[in-house]
């Protein structure tokens, strides 16, 4: 498999994973966005503005959990930099361990009731930390790919480039950008839809799918693994 083909697979699979885990957390854990910090800010703000609502502790702790995931990823990459070793596999392994914790705690918490128990809380925070590490990896190691968890910028760029192509103002770089951004956006949307049906059908065991995606990338990291730039 050539590097461009692998990069396309990598971008699509990570986009699918982010959409899947974010939607899964939202459905399973009382509207928690595991990969979308902006969404959690909005939900907390709405709760604070409405006297009849109380922001859940899970949503309040989601932001620091996300930060811890980002920080853990950064420290892991920095350690690999000092040793002069590729960081791709260790970073995927970090995400895999956190996501396995998300799945295990969620399965133990089932059935999740109307209130957030200790195990459901742990599941949500581990899932959020996993996606924090995922977002950091996108910045630190996968900057040659389109962002895989933040789709607003991807869709904006994709629409701009598509309009330029339709009006005949595109060049080769524009076409390449379209392909770069299109597959993660499509995969993210497919991940969202798949997660919704998977949770309703299988519960937390359905997290085995994103776990399998990460396991594949741990087993076979990017052929030309890059070290992060300081």
Image (tube, rainbow, N blue to C red):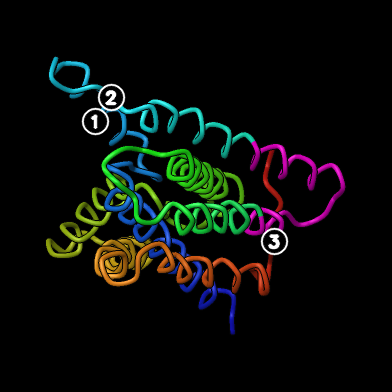
Disc 3 is placed on an element classified as helix
- Which residue is labeled 1 in the image? 43
Say which residue label 2 marks.
Answer: 55
Q: Nearer the viewer, mark 2 or mark 3?
A: 2
Decide if residue 104 is on the left or right side of residue 13.
Answer: right
**Alpha carbons under labels 3 and 1: distance apart:** 34 Å
Judging depth in this view, the residue of 61 and 216 nearest the camera is 61
Which of the two discs, 3 and 1, labels the residue nearer the N terminus? 1
Query: What range of the chain is rendered magenta?
Result: 72-93
Give the mark, 1 or 2, whose residue is nearer the N terminus: 1
Percent x, y for residue 192? Answer: 28, 61
Q: Main secondary structure of the magenta part?
A: helix
In the image, residue 216 sits, relative to residue 14, either above or below, namely: below
- Quarter-of-image position of residue 159: bottom left
Q: Give yes or no for contact between labels 1 and 2 (Cβ–Cβ under 8 Å).
A: yes
The quadrant the N terminus occupies is: bottom right
Who is closer to the viewer here, 113 or 216? 113
| Label 2: which secondary element | loop
Given residues 13 and 22, the one toward you in this image is 22
Give the vertical position of 51 relative to 183 (above or below).
Answer: above
Q: Residues within 10 Å of mark 3 (few under 14, many from 20)?
A: some
Question: Percent x, y for residue 37?
Answer: 37, 35
The residue that appears at 31% across and 45% down in the rendered structure is 153
């Amino acid at each position: 498999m050539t590097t461009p083909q692998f990069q396309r697979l990598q971008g699509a699979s990570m986009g699918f994973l982010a959409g899947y885990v974010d939607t899964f957390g939202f459905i399973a854990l009382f509207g928690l966005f595991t990969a979308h910090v902006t969404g959690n800010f909005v939900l907390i703000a709405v709760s604070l503005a409405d006297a009849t609502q109380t922001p859940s502790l899970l949503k309040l702790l989601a932001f620091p959990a996300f930060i811890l995931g980002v920080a853990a990823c950064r420290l892991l990459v920095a350690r690999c930099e000092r040793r002069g070793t590729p960081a791709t596999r260790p970073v995927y392994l970090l995400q895999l361990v956190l996501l396995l914790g998300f799945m295990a705690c969620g399965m133990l918490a089932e059935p999740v009731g109307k209130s957030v128990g200790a195990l459901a809380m742990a599941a949500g925070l581990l899932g959020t930390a996993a996606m924090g590490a995922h977002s950091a990896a996108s910045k630190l190691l996968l900057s040659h790919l389109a962002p895989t968890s933040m789709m607003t910028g991807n869709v904006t760029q994709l629409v701009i480039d598509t309009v330029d192509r339709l009006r005949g103002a595109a060049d080769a770089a524009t076409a390449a950008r379209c392909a770069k951004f299109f597959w993660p956006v499509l995969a993210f949307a497919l991940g969202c839809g798949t997660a919704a049906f998977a949770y309703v059908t299988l519960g937390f065991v359905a997290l085995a799918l994103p776990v399998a995606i990460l396991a594949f990338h741990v087993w076979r990291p990017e052929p030309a693994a890059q070290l992060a730039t300081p």
